[in-house]
Image: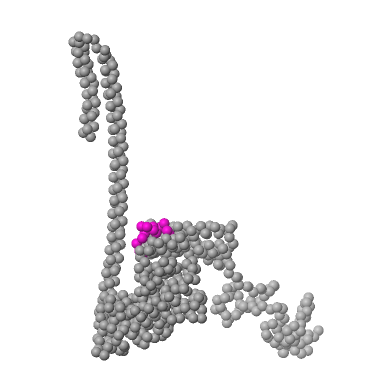
Amino acid sequence: MEDTRSVASLMDSTSSKIQQLQKAFAELESQRAVTLNLKWKELEEHFHGLERSLKRRFHELEDQEKEYETKTRKAQELLEKKKEAVEAKEKVSLERLQKKRDAAVFAINSALVKYNNPPPISITSVEDSPNKAFAADGTDENPDGTVQEAEISPEVKAYPQLLKLCGDMDSAGLHKFVSDNRKNLASLKEEIPAAFKAAANPASLVLDSLEGFYPVEAPNGDGKKDGNLLGMRRTCIMLMECLSVLLSGLDSNSLAVVLSEDVKQRAKSIAEGWSPLLGSLEMDACNGNSLEAHAFLQLLASFDIVSGFEEDGILKLIPMVSRRRQAAELCRSLGLSEKMPGVIEVLLKSGKQIDAVNLAFAFELTEQFPPVELLKSYLTDARRSTSQGGPGNASPAAQDEFNERELTGLKAVAKCVEEHNLEEQYPVEPLQKRIVQLEKAKAEKKRATEPTKPQTKRPRGAQPRVTDNHNNNNNNNKTGYGRVIPERYPQYVYDNRQFLNGPIMAAQAPPPPPPQTYTFSPAAAHGNFYGNCYQYQPPPPYFH
């Protein structure tokens, strides 16, 4: 700025300098002896031209300076806004990280308290070599190599049968016990890891329980159609998960004893037998919930045999279990955390945005995969398929299928938003309104398509009002009238009182009614019975 001011002051003094030069030139001309060819007007015009050129250039430089200052100010404001946004994100990330850290510390402390200070429970002595793995937990070892006492979690008292089944290495009995108590599966999963300590070899017990996972008679059969096979496979997965919980609380020496080389080799043989059977699985057919793929991956993780199999083959199985709640922890156990961006990309290409969002939150990849955008694209795909199946383009059955697909997608998105606390970024009120609208339309259509109950056709003409005192509380009688037994033919009421028989009473009898326009013979039609199962007796003849 000081340079600009100095240049401006010099330019303002140009006129005074020109006047001084004019005076000097006049004085010079008055004293000259020889006439000069140079005229003053030419000099004055030359200097004025220089002045105008300098002023024009000076104003251009001023405009450029102002423009540069404006751009600099805008850039500084933008940098300040970005800095504030980054600081806000850092604060939120630190708070979330602190919560996870506090939760992890609390879980670790709880586990330490649970496994280091449980009350001892006496159990039957078993062989020494496998149970030496639990000596560090407070067991007393005798010189003969047997274990007298083992510290078992107090929750095992709720199911003491588990201790006996594990101590006897009875895998079939363990399967049956879990199946019989499947209603209390949550408490079982807490007790089984502690009950495994009573087993001579917990890893071998779990491997024994895997027998029959693929039936010998039909190894490629569809397990979804066999309820017993489906339950058995779920139990196998749960037992492997419980073994992983037990192993996570052991030190390196104890872990090496439980997962010996023989055990690992046996587990690897089982996995190699299962691997070819997984080739027939399709990602779309599995819908992210394949028990076969889950069991294979859990076997690799629980027995630490991941290194014996190709990573690409393992990664191809992850989308087949992406919908299961253990998917994220399973990927961590398999050491695939760094490969999760590629897995999420595969899920997005296959239209599984919900599973991709869950894994993005589990592995903190929400910056790379924005959850709100993924959820909106999932709903867009669902609505696009629904719009293509409009009333003019699809049959009613196809339209019902499209509506059901949209309803399922809306519920999945609403649940995902609530689970990950995205209500501020993605309000669920419009989703809930659409869900209510689709469910109402579905209920109305179902009500309209239900077959109506046939109503009893009433006979024409005046009918007597019959009261059924025995069925006054019958809820099916909506009209308030007594139940009238429908008859195929009209009933005739015959007066069969015996005391009216005889000539005297016959003489006093009223004239007979006019003849009917049709004839009916009950005896010929139904024998000696009416349609209401009462026996028919012919009346005496009238005497005229």
- Look at the image and tell me whether residue 146 can be seen: yes
State yes or no: residue 366 in magenta: yes
Q: Residue 285: horizontal and vertical position, in percent?
A: 49, 68
Residue displayed at 67% across by 75% down: 463
Residue displayed at 51% across by 81% down: 217
Q: On the picture, is 250 further left or further right than 273? A: left
Residue displayed at 76% across by 82% down: 521
Please state the extent of the stretch shown in magenta in the rendering.
Answer: 362-375
Q: Residue 162: horizontal and vertical position, in percent?
A: 36, 84
State yes or no: residue 112 in magenta: no
Between 114 and 273, the one lying in front of the other is 273
Question: Looking at the rendering, which quadrant does residue 120 occupy?
Answer: bottom left
Q: In the rendered view of the protein, which quadrant contains the C terminus?
A: bottom right
Q: In the rendered view of the protein, which quadrant contains the N terminus?
A: top left
Give the colouring mode of the picture: one colour
Q: Is 526 placed above or below 325 here?
A: below
Residue displayed at 33% across by 76% down: 245
Question: Looking at the rendering, which quadrant does residue 289 occupy?
Answer: bottom left
Q: Residue 116: horizontal and vertical position, in percent?
A: 25, 78
Q: Residue 179: horizontal and vertical position, in percent?
A: 43, 81
Q: Is 393 placed above or below 24 here?
A: below
Question: Looking at the rendering, which quadrant does residue 307 occupy?
Answer: bottom left
Between 446 and 456, the one lying in front of the other is 446
Q: On the picture, is 521 further left or further right than 101? A: right
